[in-house]
Amino acid sequence: MEGVSAGISQIIILALIVLLGFVLTKTNYIDAHMSNKLMGLLMNVTLPCMIIASTSSVQFDQIANQIPLVCLLGFILFFVMVFVSFLACLLLRVPLDSIACYVFSGICTQTAFIGVPVIAAVLGDHTIILSSLFVAVVNVFLFSLGLAMLSVDQQLREARLAGKMSNPGEKSASHFSFKHALSHVSFTWRNFVNPALVAALLALGVLFLQIPLPYVLSSAFDMVGAMTAPISMLIIGYYVSQMRLKELFTEWRIIPFGVIRYLFGSLILYFVLCQIITDGLLVAIAVLEFAMPAGAMVPAFLATYKGDALLGSKNTILACVCSFVYLPVIIVVMNTFS
């Protein structure tokens, strides 16, 4: 029960910081400009520093055998995210024009933004590199196949609006070109490379080559990296404060979708992985990353592809708020059956 108590205590602490972010926004200490600056600071500075600082708490030979399995899990679970999200859409009879929004919300999640710091808080700093590698693998598919899906959905909607799909089974299908839709996606190295990935690779290099970081440098990385979780929770508090309560519940499918995708999906995944993977730590990392709520970038990506950014915002905010309820449930279940 100590593991459960510690995990739930960490979730409660993070929830209190979210509340602080909400209060600071309402009292004008945090505004849209500062929120964007904090987001940049988090993704480009504090998260990479936290990843590099984690090298002081782990030896390469302790994780060498786990790295291939982590990469394989990241590959498999991305497609599991797509499947569970799409299945939830079918069960809830989500309108055709909104399916891509819901599915993208289910795959573009807070794996790095919340996942890495939360997993470190619950399971220990030695998990940071492994969870960061998991995120890197998922992001490769997110920023390629995920964005391709949005591009295809955009052309489908434009074709329907133009009256070109009145009879999808016949000639109208010829008006739709997957090749043309995919051509809107830029597949360059910039889609896949980000500071967190670079930091994870550098950290692995430091561990593999057994290069000890000087105490002063290691301590500096550790102090800056320690700001990651508080900053991420403050930003969530800002987003929560920006949405009126009535607006959040105008789309009734959001909460049932979240229950299926984040709670039920994660619990089923846990029991399945326990049958095929003996490493309990990797199972816990994979399940907690899978359970992370919709990401803050969902509305921005939807807007880029002319999707429903407002629906994406509601998905993100409600998923983040509800995560402070369902994450403790998942932690309790994992501890009970471990």
Image (spheres, rainbow, N blue to C red):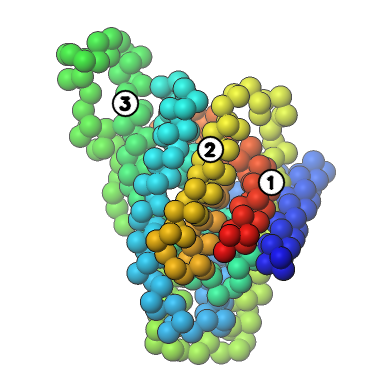
| Front residue of this view, candidates 6 and 197 | 6
Q: Quadrant of the N terminus?
A: bottom right
Q: As shown in the figure, which amino acid type bears the numbered disc 3?
A: Gln
Name the disc covering residue 155, or none: 3
Mark 1 lies on residue: 325
Q: Is residue 268 visible?
A: yes
Q: Residue at x 61, y 41 (%)?
A: 319
Q: Is residue 233 left or right of residue 149?
A: right
- In x, y percent, where is residue 303? 47, 33
> Marks 3 and 1, how far apart in space?
37 Å
Answer whether residue 235 is visible to the viewer in this image. Answer: no
SS assignment at label 1: helix
Of badges 3 and 1, the one in the foreground is 1
The percent coordinates of residue 233 (x first, y second) are 68, 53
Looking at the picture, which amino acid does disc 2 mark?
Ile
Q: What label sits on residue 289 in the rendered view?
A: none
| Residue contact between numbered discs 3 and 2, judged by CB atoms under 8 Å | no
Instruction: Judge left or right: residue 249 versus residue 152.
Output: right
Location of residue 90 (image quadrant): top left
Residue at image point 39% right, 87% down: 209
Which residue is located at x 73 percent, y 52 percent?
Answer: 15
